[in-house]
Image (cartoon, coloured by chain):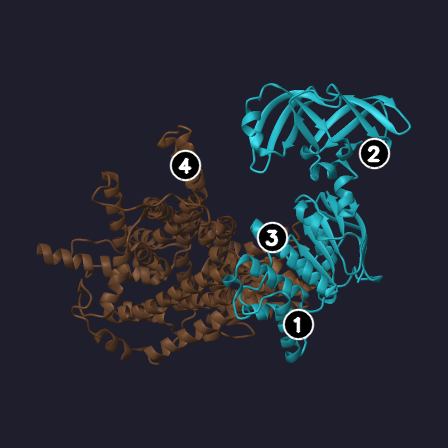
Chain colours: A cyan, B brown
Amino acid sequence: MELRVEGLVKRYGATKALDGVTFTAESGRILAILGPSGSGKTTLLKVVAGLVAPDAGRVYFDDRDVTGLPPQKRKVGYVFQSLALFPHMRVKDNIAFPLEARGRSHGETEATVRKVVDLTSLQGLEDRYPRELSGGQQQRVALARAIAAEAELLLLDEPLASLDTPLRASLLAEIKRVQEETGMTTLYVTHDQGEALSVGRRLMVIFDGKIEALGEPFQVYVQPPTSRVASFLGFTNRLKARVLKEGPDHVEAEACQGFLTFPRGTVRTVGKELQILFRPDGAELTLKRETPGQLEGVLRSLVFEGRRLRARVMTDQGEVEVTVARPESYPELLGLVGKKAYVLLRVEEALVV
Amino acid sequence: MSGGRGGRGRSWAARVSLVEALSVSVLGLLFLAPLVSIAQGASLESLAELLTDPYLLRVIANTFLQAVLSTVPAVLAALPLAYFFARYEFRLSSLARAVLLAPFFAPAFAAAQAFLIMYGKTGVINTLLMQVFGLAEPPVSLLYSLQAVVLAHVFYYVPLAFTALEAGFASIDQDLIDAARSLGASEWRILRKVMFPQLAPSLAASGTLIFVFSFLTFATPLLIGGSFTTLEVETYFYWSRFGGWTTAKTLSTLQLGLNLIFVLAIFLARERVLQPRMLAKAGGLARNRLSLLCGSLAVKALTLYALLLIAFEALPIYFIFASGFSQGFYLIFPLGASIENFQRLFSFTFGARVTVLDSMGQSIAIAALAALLSVSASLLTAYSIAYSKGRARSLLSAATVAPLAVSRIALAMGLYTIYGAGVLRLYGSWELLALSHLVVIYPLTTRLIESALIRVDPDLIDAASTAGASRLYTFLRVELPLIGPSLAAASLIAFASSIGEFTFALFFATGGLQTMPVSVERLLDSRQLGPASAMTSLILAVIFVSALAANLLAKRSLGGLTYGA
């Protein structure tokens, strides 16, 4: 089923949780929705599920306008951030709940529960109560309950937020597998960029109730359309560069005593000044002047983080953060704190605005 | 992010307002209408008469005086005790707490009766002193005075202040105190600047509640006040007197004006006192094991104080049982145990018609009906409170606690006027008494059920509706099982409250209708102290068992509402 929403607006008092949201979620695919907390992600899911009525806008399931339909009639599977398992029901009764609520026969309910239990690898846990399960198992029960009644649309609200990091990867794979087997159109809400980038075919980024990016995860990651999305996705360094020369293919600019050459295509607007955004891992730290492209500064601090080092370099435009991929150089580099250091930008990974 | 309980669709709103209308009509019919009928029955003439009567003016002044004199010592006495329990751990501490709370659950008439047994002319203290010192006359003469009423109130309300203040101490975060200490604040400054501000709401709330309850006192001055009376008692006397109805109604109307302020005060205090367990979520003070051998003098003094106060609270209750189960007074219970008082009790017939068994049967029937009605009405009301928002919600909440802060004699007269007399002519029926109990029990049960309902995660309701469940289906399959233990606990509390209720029971008693507390009063009136103690022992046993069971159920329901880590 294809989900289409048009111009959704939802106000809570003075704040707009949703501010004109329009998008289409492809049938049978996962759409990841990324945004900081309070950006309106959960409200969006609740409006789509019919739990919250929008102040304006429409929701369509395959061209059917469901905006006025109560949640009971929408055939939506919802995995809540809190999971919302019924604490007084056993696993099998939690999973059977949507089937019984919709008046399915006893035999059909039992068969479906068995099928869903197999699909979500919950065999042997059917008679347990939610409190007797681990976090990952509770998560799978919530997923099982959401898909039990053959919903047309699966809504996942931060499904892995409550789990420990090692468990997340395996459950994420599990969710993807179940989604593929059921072929349900899925909205996957998260504030974790790793999850958002890896879970779906498409990625949507929202801020303050507005969509700021929508596209393939790779595209959004390398070319974030707005500077807010860019900094949310890790483009935390920001420099100004003075334009020296505009060629047909290249733009040459200068920043912090470094000369940078950008391919014409990556520069969106050319004026007297360019804004350069780059990730800490989109540059290298060097101690000697090797090419004219290096930016100059003073090594201010060095933090050992295990697999990499994080260096802060003070340039004449303020601090820049650079990661060093070789942690074994820590003792050597530590001695150079306070000395001159150079930052070599990988121009092709930088964003120029 | 927060859909919360408010943001549901339109069809919900319609259903909720139906529930609201139902619960408002319960309050309107059983609470507001009776009070309005009292105000209608008042007259300006008798108001002028009353306000120039020096005797009555003294009664009004006395009512205020005893309320203030009861409140201040009760709160002050409870403060060190609450600190002691919040600060120190010791074996049997939960038993000590349960014993301490016993008077709180006992009905007011039983507290007064316990005072008779302890401090009366032939009471425990006097008997003991006379035997030990060989005196001919009882040395302690305390009863039938202002002091007796005040002391009985202090005895009765220390546990209430204790629970509120203990919750207050529990809401103080030890980390804050440690932080203040590490920042160099003196202990005195910490007490003043860190602890007191956190405790102040609990102090104010318990003080307010005790003042209001003492002001509205009835059983205590009636039984042990002698010629010292209060407004409630005087109003009741006017009502019982031939031709005194207009005066009684005028006096009540006068009091209802004050009660309005009480309602507001109780509404503001209710979070702290009526449901203190909810607050005890913060870290609380760091607790030390109590060690008397190596503790400082202050700790020893505090421990001694706690023991004395626990004895002051526990002994009167203990001696009700002891004097019910023995002849004469035996300090150590199993010695001299006998069932003679029970034999005498059960052979007693009140007037011509009512036997003790009749009285018990009536009490049980009334309590069962009152429990059933109040839990059903509370469920409706708790629902509309939990699902309404903003001003409607606090208004409903205020209306619900109002019956606690209003003169029961006024309510009783109003209920009589509307339902007892008039078209329905229910006077003398046990159903009318059950209805009157409903009015005053309903605030308690509503609080219990409301707090259970509020703890049900709104996501569960959303989960059920996305799963295709109708509102009714969700209520039956999700909410009802989750709040079930709380409903059971509320029923028990309602039953226990009705069994021990005295004011309405006395007001509506007739030759053929006489609940157990009224029987106790009649027994005391005819100097049958032993059988009276036996009867009260039965009532207290029912109440304490119900309270314990309710407590266990409440704990279970707290655990059952979540499954998280």
Q: Going by the image, does A67 lie left or right of B482? A: right
**Residue at disc 2, secondary structure:** helix
| Residues at marks 1 and 3 on the same chain | yes
Chain of the residue under label 2: A
Where residue A136 appears, x then y in whole percent? 57, 58
- Of badges 1 and 3, the one in the foreground is 3
- Can you name the residue that lies furthest to the right here? A248
**Residue at disc 1, secondary structure:** helix
- Of badges 2 and 4, the one in the foreground is 2
Residue marked by disc 1: A99
Spatial CA distance of label 2 from label 4 is 58 Å
Q: Residues within 10 Å of mark 4 (few under 14, many from 20)?
A: many
Please tell me which of labels 1 and 3 falls first in the chain: 1
**Residue at disc 4, secondary structure:** helix
Spatial CA distance of label 4 from label 1 is 53 Å
Residue marked by disc 2: A266
Residue marked by disc 4: B177
Chain of the residue under label 3: A
Q: Going by the image, does B114 lie left or right of A31? A: left
Q: Report the disc number at residue A168.
A: 3
Nearer to the camera, B26 or A27: A27
Give amino acid for label 2.
Thr
Spatial CA distance of label 3 from label 2 is 35 Å
